[in-house]
Amino acid sequence: MTLLASLDWHFIREHIPEFARALKRTLEVAGIGIAGASAIGVVLGAVRAHRIPVLSQLAAVYVEVIRNTPILVQIFLLAYGLPQLPGHHIILQPFTVGWLSVTIWGGAFNTENFRAGFEAVPGRFREAGRALGFGRLGTFLNVTLPIGGRIALPSSINTYISVLKNTSLLTAVGYAELTNTGYSLESVTFKAPEIFFVLGATYLVVVWTLSILIRLLESRLALPEAR
Amino acid sequence: MPLPVGTLPSWVGPVAHYMAHDGVPETLRIAAFAVTGSMIVGIVLGTLLTIRFLPLRSLIRLYIEIWRGLPIVITIFIVFYALPSAPLIHHRFSPFTGAALGLVLWGSAQVAEATRGAVQSIPREQHEAASALGFGWVGRHGSVILPQALRRLLPPLVGLLVNVLQNTTIASIIGVTELLATGQRSTERLAYSSGDSHALAIYGALMGAFFAISFPLTRLAIFLERRLV
Amino acid sequence: MRRIAVVTLVVALAAGALAGWGSAAHRGGASPTAGAVAPKPKPKVTKPKLPPLPSAIRRRKKFEIGVKCDFPPFGFIDVRGNNDGYDVQTARRFAQLAFGSKKKVDLVCVTTPSRIPTLTSSRVDIIISTLTWTSARADVIDFSIPYYSATGRLLVPNSSSIHNVSDLGGKTIVTTRGALYATWTRNCFKSSKLLEVDSPSAAVLAVKNGQADTFMFDDAFLLGVATQDPTLKLTRDKFLNIPWGIGIRKGDTATARWVNAAIRYMKKRDEFVKILRSNAPARLVGDFLDNVPRPKSNFQYPVGKDPVSDCSSR
């Protein structure tokens, strides 16, 4: 408790609006990243699970490259490498680099999550779907996706939480999310304990809340056998 | 336009030499420190987590949830920038030590969780058999439970190595001159002296280097998982 | 058989990790070598009469100095991977004055946010890292007497509508994290948007890519950029002319005494001009002769006033 008492609370109160704005930007980028990662995960996970030729191999390459390289290097590649693409000179704003990099990163991990989920759907369910007259796509949409998606829920939750945490690395490309704002403030005021206490507490509250909320959701959505 | 291998552009040699000579050893140093520290602290905490003593379990659980919940860059900032001013702890760390300790805090939380899982996956019969043979708690864990649990820990430990190696890049943010930082310095030097930073090539090469190390290790982890469990 | 293989693998990994850790601790800690060793016999060259070196540095027989590695022409990495620049050459001259050789110094890369913690953690003895005097920094560390004096300038694209600081309202200003220009912008340009990046190079890119309207920074770096890039130019105004100092731990009077004496020694013999000439393109040297300490110059820190809060120069 003495640790808390020694902080300059006046300073903290003074800067709450600034931190709140920065948190909003963190959540915006994380939100887009989570949505994008879900979409990529479902589509490419299905491609991989159904072993669609060519696309499945390409997806595998995407997944392995992203999962086996540091996300910070991926961010730099988007921010500083793309402008040098011969002929195309793609220049992205920090916000764009932000949501794009976390979406690409999250999508790769999520592809594996959903692939495992879809492959874990018992064969008899899919056969039942076919017996009911669904085609391949119909079976997927009405049987594999709902059931496999729920199986994949725990691992995809972890990926989404990691996406949120990884937005902190966007400091490196100047996007004014929470970590960047705190870091810049510390560089001029030197009030590191106050600033990083606020940052740490904020991230923990958001991450833990998300964690609990989604586990509640998970228990409600769990398959009857799993309950 | 096809280039024979022998005629790489002139900027490549010095950059490659600088990155390999200065960046790679620093990355490996951070990784070695972080992996060792994470293993030692994590295995101890993870084993303690299996003891049925609520206060201890809660404390360790809090430790794990904090260091797994915080982004690693924030943990490193806390260790390097904030800790020196905290009462009691007044110690200041160099950037290298600050980054490495931050990685240990995160890594040990991961290992603790994995160790708990590994220890608890050892069937009750092993505990009972060991007790029947006259082992006490320490002997039981030291001679029977932990050796089996450690074997089950091998795949996650290899996974930890991969993650630590990739996360050493975060140390560049507080000024440690590891591999990513040497790449950044090279792009800056090239941009200032010749107008062309060659960022695409340099960061692309970094992706390749990390992939070349991580991919085989990931495959090893999967292989170990299949063979040992 | 399999158990033996597993155990061997684990032991090998642990041994490798411990070896790496051992060498890491050795490099990362930088503790002075134990035991006092008799000082080297002085070389025949007339040594300058400087105060005694602090004992830790004397025992270690070399300096540990923090320098920039991303800020030409003061601290950067050259094509051979070696440190070079005005700050770096000053550091090497210190090593020569103290130990007779320019090699007796370990140069540690620092960034603007990390340089002060790197100094206060004793990882380095002093920092020669483009450190402008501000009262906030002077609260945390001690400054040597000035060794350079920079002026703020604005870098803009040729087609920019910004002609001087009064045009900055509503525009996006980019600068490096923790630079005094960041504080000045926050204090005096509240209608402008501030973008902070981690290296001067990234800031130049931000201007070229249109993410920022102008890069507010020190003249020495900006002039080098503008000379080399025909699409960029500097506006005419100059502002925030504040000297740079060498960062010293608070209360470390032994080091401060030595450093100040060394700077005075170099200043008297006009050595800073020599260092400037070897780091600035010949045609630009004339622009910077007033920035370096010369025998007759007298740079002062604006103690008592805080220029970054002074908005009257807008």
Image: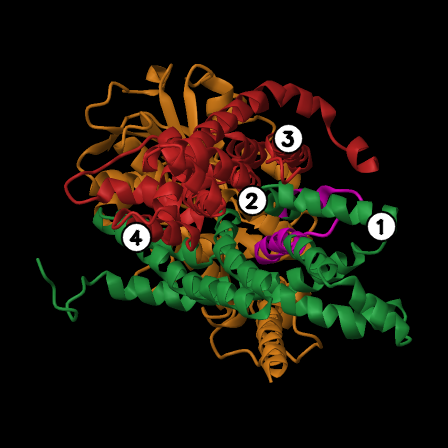
Say if residue A122 shows up in the picture: yes
In the rendered image of this protein, which colour is used for chain C? Answer: orange
In the rendered image, residues at marks 1 and 4 fall on the same chain:
no
The kind of residue tagged 2 is Val
Chain for disc number 3: A
The kind of residue tagged 3 is Thr
In the image, C260 versus C4, the foreground residue is: C4
Tell me the residue that label 1 is attached to. Answer: B56
Which quarter shows the N terminus of chain A? Answer: top right
Tell me the residue that label 2 is attached to. Answer: B73
Chain for disc number 4: A
Dot 4 or dot 3: first in sequence order is 4
Instruction: Read off the magenta span.
Output: B80-109
Task: Mark 2 vs mark 4: give the one in front.
Answer: 4
- Name the residue: 65% across, 48% down: B79
Tell me the residue that label 4 is attached to. Answer: A57
Q: CA distance from mark 1 to mark 2?
A: 28 Å
Q: CA distance from mark 2 to mark 4?
A: 34 Å
Q: CB under 8 Å between callouts 3 and 1?
A: no
x and y, in percent, of residue B65 in the image: 69, 43
Task: Indicate yes or no whether the magenta region holds residue B85.
Answer: yes
Q: CA distance from mark 1 to mark 4?
A: 48 Å
Q: CA distance from mark 3 to mark 1?
A: 26 Å
Tell me the residue that label 3 is attached to. Answer: A202
In the image, B53 versus A93, the foreground residue is: B53
Q: CA distance from mark 2 to mark 3?
A: 14 Å
Does residue C145 lie above or below A211 as drawn? below
